[in-house]
Amino acid sequence: MFLILDELFFCFNALISARPPFCSLDTQETLKEYISQTLLNGRMAVEADDDLLGEEIIDSMGVMRLIAFIEETFDCVVAQADITIFNFRTIKAIDAYLASRSL
């Protein structure tokens, strides 16, 4: 029995490491559109690699509005512990975070 569990665990880890780091261009486009048009009122366009926090593109209130948008749009709950610079620094990081939640 333990051998079967070990094999399943090995296969699962191989599957996780094989998936692409950023899952959906649609997700990235949705996030870029929301940030550019709603949070920034069309003042500037953002790209998937822009440092949203380090470059002060959005502030703490913008992060909270972004999280509310993510929860509503992608039908998920973002745990308080998940609100980190690592998960929300860029649009690609947010996409990777959302992809990791869908496993």
Image (cartoon, rainbow, N blue to C red):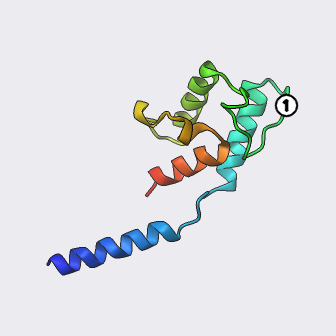
Would residue 101 be found to the left or right of residue 60 on screen? left
Work out whether 11 lies above or below 94: below
- Amino acid type, callout 1: Met
Q: Position of residue 69 (x, y in %)?
A: 59, 32
Residue at the image position 54 percent from the left and 41 percent from the top: 87
Identify which residue is drawn at 48% across, 68% down.
17
Q: Is 16 displayed left or right of 51 in the figure?
A: left
Quarter of the image with the C terminus is bottom left
Residue 93 placed where, x, y %? 60, 46
Residue 39 lies, with reference to residue 95, above or below; the image says above
How packed mark 1 is, by other alpha carbons closer than 10 Å (few <14, some 14-19, many 20 or more), is few
Q: Which quadrant of the rendered structure holds the N terminus?
A: bottom left
Residue at 66% from the left image edge and 31% from the top image edge? 53
Question: Outermost residue toward the top?
Answer: 61
Q: Secondary structure at mark 1?
A: loop
The vertical placement of 40 against 74, above or below, is above
> Farthest front residue?
54
Measured from the top left, where is residue 75 in percent x and y? Answer: 49, 41
Residue 84 in view in this figure: yes
Is 84 situated above or below 93?
above
Q: Quadrant of residue 19?
A: bottom right
| Of the pair 95 and 38, the residue shown nearer to us | 95
Judging by the rendered image, the residue that carries numbered circle 1 is: 44
